[in-house]
Image: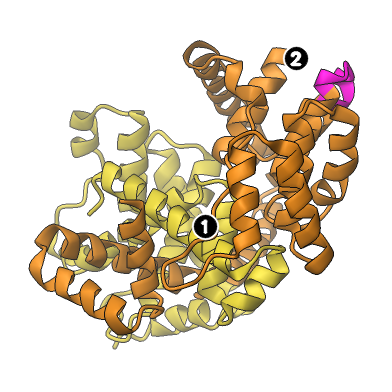
Chain colours: A orange, B yellow
Amino acid sequence: MEKLTDKIQDYIDGLLDGDELQAFEQKLREDEDFRNLVYLQREVNDIIHKRVNSGEQDLRISLRAAEQETRSHDGATPLIKKIKPLIAVVSAACLFVVGYLFFTNSNSSLYELPAMQSEVVRGEEAVVRYEEAVRLYNAKSYKESRKMLNQLIQEEPEVVQYQYYAALTYVGEKKWKEALKALEPVAFGTSIFQEEATYYMAVCHHKEGNDAEAKRLLQTISSQGKIGEKAKKLLKKID
Amino acid sequence: MHIDQIYIQYLKENNSKGIQLIYNKYAKQIVTLIVKNSGTEDDGYDIFQEALVDIYHMAQEKDFVLTTSFGAFLSIVCKRKWLNALKKNQRMPVTNLEQSVLYVEDDSSKQWDDMLEKVDKENRVMALLNTMGESCQQIIKRCMTEKHQEKIAEALGISYAYLRKKKSECMATLIRKVKESGLF
């Protein structure tokens, strides 16, 4: 199933060619469910493409400015008035979310490392050393995996993904101090691993008994997605 | 084409003076309507803003032509949005809603139904995207706005192959959420 979805996005992005494209189009003609799935993904793809390029964010800036101007003439205090009714709703939502997380999830997954992602994408050859590092990491042979990753870091120091997983190998070995040192540049950077690195820094501080710093870091993580949920759970646990 | 098409143009051009004029002319009327129907003043302004954003998106369609006054059209969009919000939050029983001044059951609104439904659907897809993790959102949005994916991968500090793999996974997760929502 995962290979199939890989192919769908590649097809939409126009990245399939040759035999692969022919095989995909044949399946498209013969399999109605598959065809519907491709059409759905294309429609969603088109909606997002249209919306993110629509200039909506610029319009919203003008709308907010106009609202502020309008309300200031009404003698209202927009920010406070806007926030006040939300407080009860947000508080209730927080209680619900915290309660839900508390009762439905165990804490055992809080310290688990994420699986390292393979790079094998259809139509491309895998980078042998990276794939070996993935295999070793996922088999919890952290020291060996780190050795391979360090070689890759030497060759491509700008690829943060290698640094991130290399740092996580220390977490896997429970070497909290080394992990903190290696995670820090990723957590303070701007890559897509920034929040995850911050989370694992918090885990390290927590394991080191420095809960104040762990809490401070966890509070900087946005509430969306899996890492947001894990951060909330860990905060609750520390409290 | 209605003479009020100029207001649509203000939105399309993000004309700040024109937008201020829209607020001066129509905001109070809409806010009052929402307040009279179980809402607060803040709800009123939120609905007003979201309705203008919806109209902005509708106006991007090349066959969009305003055939009624801007005020009447804006009122239809706001009523519909507020009805949906009330139903979603169950702040008013459905029977009361149907008797309320919000209930829209006339031909003037029906001509916009398809367009309004399309915008609702798009809004919900974007809302689902915004429930995803920060990295998935970033990857999907950047891949939709920037042409060269190799450069995106470089900027995000990941390899091109990893970006493609991650994008595929993120899109698959989003499609699952869309299917579960019963939206399509």
Chain on which label 2 sits: A
Residue B22 as seen in the image, left or right of residue B77: right
Image x and y of residue A41, in percent: 31, 63
Verify whether residue A212 appears in magenta: yes
Q: Along the line of sight, which residue is nearer the eye, A79 or B26?
A: A79
Residue B36 seen from this side = yes
Verify whether residue B113 appears in magenta: no
Q: Is residue A45 above or below residue A231?
A: below
Residue B23 seen from this side = no
Mark 2 residue element: helix
Mark 1 and mark 2, same subunit? no
Residue A88 as seen in the image, left or right of residue B62: right
Chain on which label 1 sits: B
Determine whether label 1 and label 2 are within 8 Å by CB.
no
Quarter of the C terminus of chain B within the rendering: bottom left
Residue under the point 70% across and 50% down = A193
Quarter of the N terminus of chain B within the rendering: bottom left
**Amino acid beneath label 2:** Ile
Image x and y of residue B88, in percent: 34, 36
Residue wearing tag 1: B166
Residue under the point 49% across and 80% down = B12
Q: Is residue A225 above or below residue B89?
A: below
Q: Which residues are magenta?
A: A206-214
Provide the major secondary structure of the magenta segment. Answer: helix
Image disc number at residue A238: 2
Quarter of the rendering containing residue B69: bottom left
